[in-house]
Image: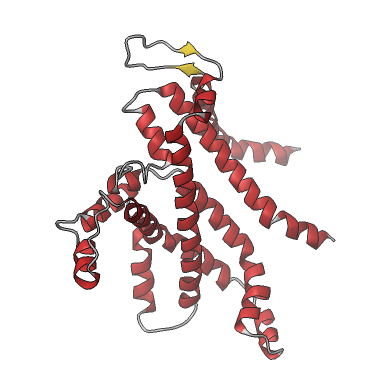
Amino acid sequence: MRSNKVGWLLLAPTILILGVFGILPFLYVLYVSFHQWNPFGASPDMMFRGARNFRRLVFDGEFLNSIRYTLEFALFAVFSEVVLGYFLAQLFMREFPGKGFFRTIHTLPLIVAPIVVGSVWRLMTTPSIGIIPYYLNNWFGYDMNIGRDPNAAFLLTVVMDVWHWTPLVTLTLLAALVSLPKEPFEQAEIDGASRWQIFWHITLPMIRPAILATVFIRMMDALRTVDEVWMLTGGGPGAATRYVGLHIWKVVFPKTDYGYGSAISIIVLYLTLVMCWALYVGLVAPRARKGEA
């Protein structure tokens, strides 16, 4: 009984911080989502609107398009980061000249602020001064201009996100690979298993928890990306890269529609939780039931 009290006492600061900076803001946003509120308008008071803000979402074409663009961005970016991160982790498992230097260079993007990443990529892709359009035009004859090409703008946001966050995936999977026991792999090689069989039947099942944790973290981050894309494309051209985080920002700040922006935030949080739950049910739960059987 005494140990339980000590445990709760040690957890109290964390619970307090979580409540102040996590639960209370969420409850406040939920409260605002049921109101019409423009604190800078002629009538700055909140007006209760019930579920009208949520009904408005169903017919908001800009919001629905931003959800579609965000899902496409998140799927392309996270899948590319996991695949590339795994191969880089396997590379770092081997010894080669300059391994330490390459690992240091590889992890440098993680220490750069997202807004700085977006600014640097904006400079590199500006048609008049950017190094990327210059070499694409000289080598391949391709005139890249993300200000007028929606496909190029979307692809570049994915590439930027992959460049920025692949090192995180690499470090996570590298830690998982280093912790694997050697006996199963040695036994498989003795039995004549191919590399693909070893990967599919031994490596992948053993590092699946690390992969799933990485996918959850990166998926949640990708669904709420704002600053990088805002600095690179501003959500354009048109609305090609107006992901849901940018859409919320435009609704809340330029339009000062705090009630509707809060409703969008609640729905996006709900969709994120549903996606994580679906990933868990689809990938983890079936294998757990199979193991119990």
In-front residue for pair 152/284: 152
Picture quarter with the N terminus: top right
Q: Position of residue 124 (x, y in %)?
A: 22, 58
Q: Residue at x 48, y 41 (%)?
A: 67
Q: Position of residue 105 (x, y in %)?
A: 33, 68
Q: Position of residue 249 (x, y in %)?
A: 37, 33
Q: Residue at x 37, y 59 (%)?
A: 159
Answer above or below: position of 98 versus 71. below
Q: Residue at x 45, y 40 (%)?
A: 65
In-front residue for pair 164/33: 33
**Residue 210 at least partly seen:** yes
* Corner quadrant of residue 160: bottom left
Count numbered badges in the picture: 0
Q: Residue at x 39, y 78 (%)?
A: 99
In-front residue for pair 28/19: 28
Answer above or below: position of 43 versus 275. above
**Residue 25 at least partly seen:** no
What colouring method underlies this structural image? secondary structure
Q: Residue furthest right?
A: 293
Q: Residue furthest left?
A: 128
In-front residue for pair 33/114: 33
Q: Position of residue 91 (x, y in %)?
A: 46, 77
Answer above or below: position of 45 versus 268. above
* Corner quadrant of residue 247: top left
Picture quarter with the C terminus: bottom right
Answer above or below: position of 241 versus 31. below
Q: Is residue 54 left or right of residue 144?
A: right
Q: Is residue 108 left or right of residue 142?
A: right
